[in-house]
Image (cartoon, rainbow, N blue to C red):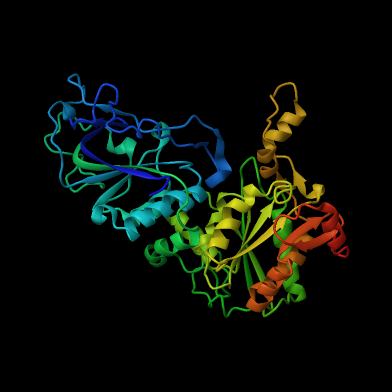
Amino acid sequence: MENNACLTLKRVCVDEGMLVLFNNDSQLTPQNPYGSSRMDVQAGQWNFPSRGGANSDALVGHMRKHFIPTRRASRLESNPALVNPVFSNCTLPVFILQDWPYNMGEVLARLAAMVDVLFEQQGLADHRATLVLATPMGLGLTPYHLAFLEPHSLHAVVSLDAMSSRPHAAALHPALVAWSDEGHVSCFETAVYCMLEGRVQDVVHTARTLLKHMLPLLPPDPLGFGSAGEGRPLPPLAEDTTLRVVLEARSGPARSFKNLDEIVRACSEANQRGFVAGRFRGIACRVLHTADTPELHGLRRFHASVAAVRSAHLLVAIHGAGAANCAFMEEGGIAGLLEIRPCRLGTFICFWPDGHMAGQLAKANHTVRMFAYNVEDPAQCLPSDYEAEELAHPRDFRKRKDLNVRMRDQHVVLNPRQFMAYLTHVAALLSDKSAYHEALRADRVHGYPLAEGLALGALCVKNKTRLEAAADRSIK
């Protein structure tokens, strides 16, 4: 597959995060001790997942690229399992290396998509594989790794660090493990190595496969939209006349709603006044927290988040990994993503935000709708925590040069009146397919809140004067 490589390895062992090759064919030479010219140069980019937060809330910096160390077997092996190795014919590990393993959106768009194509569509390894994810610095797997990969793995998904830990030397039999019927084995007759790069299909297509396995596991109404309270089945989205809106809460040092409570209150007040837009005759807004709690964590938390977005007509999320949850929304043009883009991110810089969810949903023919809310009123944007610290103590910090990152990471303080006006516009388009396509043709789908008022336009309107001229000055 173009830009992606999977190699078949023969007689390979794992040892403390490393692959050790015992195959003495002609490829193994002093000049090429890896057996492949590709494996020693392939490395994955990643951000460090710090404590606290969830998804991209708690990702810190760009780390040095990680890779899977690989070497030939030696006569000086210190692991007893590698001195006289017994190679298993029953367990077939697929070792996977990918970029951005701790960004849920990237894992869905890259890893989950590629695994879907290779295993579900092309039948790689005849569905006999145990998927092994190489994580940097011995870090663990996340719930979304398990949710995205386990449908394609014969046994439990495992990190390379866990699989390659050394078995207890004094044990009479291999320890029981979830990733192999044989117990903890270290050597394999056949294995596959994959460096998964690029994006081979849209996230909605990938989510369809995953939902086949997830749907029975999803709680019916985790945010309590139903009149009978949380936990009861909801009316179908296509029939419910109350617009259900889910707003993603972020708790990290960048890209958070600073007045989420005001937005929720404005939503409630609009409903009390008699919200009307298209076929909708009411509105209900709920806040989605994706971070683990003692009561809800791990896969149960992840499944609750997926269920939450599937219960909504509209997911509101600041540009980032959380917006990728829209891939799991109901299709058919009855639900959509409202992506908030901090000041200048959707105008001065367009390739970045437009290349992620906007591009993904376009490839899926907008079966899940895309609405961009490009904030262009400086009063509605605040610097990220790290930029605020730099501005307060300029002598103590080296100023970052990446303007794109600074724009992306701004916090937002949305004008409730403008935001509710745009929600009303979006609701009318969600309830009427012909109105949506007419708005697309007229370049009146996406929102631009300005100091002068609320403007509508196409994606990436760079001409500020044009936006100001088009703004509804009664909505400030």
The image quarter containing residue 316 is bottom right
Query: Residue pushed farthest top?
Result: 76
Asked whether, in this view, residue 142 is left or right of residue 362, the answer is left
Can the viewer see residue 292 in this picture? no
Asked whether, in this view, residue 453 is left or right of residue 382, the answer is right
How far across and how far down the image is residue 129, in percent? Answer: 26, 50
> 168 and 210: which one is in front?
210
Q: At 43% across and 56% down in the image, what residue appears?
A: 300
How far across and how far down the image is residue 377, in percent? Answer: 81, 51
Can the viewer see residue 82 in this picture? yes
How far across and how far down the image is residue 24, in percent? Answer: 17, 30
> 343 and 381: which one is in front?
343
Q: At 70% across and 47% down in the image, what residue appears?
A: 345
Asked if residue 335 is positioned above or below residue 46 in the image, the reply reads below
Q: Count the numbered circles shown.
A: 0
Asked if residue 279 is positioned above or below residue 356 in the image, the reply reads below
The image quarter containing residue 309 is bottom right
> 350 and 158: which one is in front?
350
Asked if residue 141 is positioned above or below residue 128 in the image, the reply reads above
Asked if residue 234 is positioned above or below residue 109 in the image, the reply reads below
The image quarter containing residue 428 is bottom right
> 425 and 388: which one is in front?
425
Asked whether, in this view, residue 439 is left or right of residue 476, the answer is left
